[in-house]
Amino acid sequence: MLETYIRFFPKRYECPHCGKTTLPQLRWCEPRCHHTIAYENHVLLQLINSTTYDVSIIVHLSEDEVEGIVKRRISTSVNWDLIKKIELLGMDEISRKKDN
Ligand SMILES: [Zn+2]
């Protein structure tokens, strides 16, 4: 498979009055993010049954970059107001040592 990278430098606009600069809002990239939403979704999918370290090797990012994507994109809190009733609750366990 051929790896393809597209480098994009969004136009920065400067206010002629106060000198403040702004960046355009893009549908496919969150502000101040270095990767597209599609690419971040790809990285998140790779994390199913894998560690951030494993995925960092596969996608050629640092472990910090993979963790940054997780922190930005995966909510760590639940809005319980949106959940009326829990129909089914599944639980799983992970063994950290062999034969535990
Ligand atoms: Zn201004």
Image (cartoon, rainbow, N blue to C red):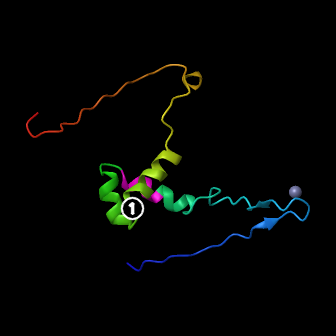
In this orientation, which residue lies closer to the viewer: 23 or 14?
A: 14
Q: In this figure, which residue is indicated by the disc labeled 1?
A: 62
In this orientation, which residue lies closer to the viewer: 89 or 78?
A: 78
Asked whether, in this view, residue 72 is left or right of residue 10, the answer is left
Q: Amino acid at mark 1?
A: Ser
Q: Which quarter of the figure is the N terminus placed in? A: bottom left
**Residue at 62% across, 60% down:** 29
Residue, far left: 99
Ligand 1 lies in which image quarter? Answer: bottom right
The vertical placement of 47 against 21, above or below, is above
Residue, far top: 85
Give x and y (percent) for residue 8: 62, 73
* Number of marks drawn: 1
The residue stretch that appears in magenta? 42-47
Instruction: Report the magenta stretch's main SS.
Output: helix
Give x and y (percent) for residue 44: 43, 53
Quadrant of residue 43 in the image?
bottom left
Quadrant of residue 99 in the image?
top left
Give x and y (percent) for residue 70: 46, 48
In this orientation, which residue lies closer to the viewer: 83 or 4?
A: 4
Does the segment drawn in magenta span residue 46?
yes
Asked whether, in this view, residue 12 is left or right of residue 32, the answer is right
**Residue at 48% across, 52% down:** 69
Disc 1 crowd rating (10 Å Cα; few below 14, some 14-19, many 20+) is: some
Residue, far bottom: 2
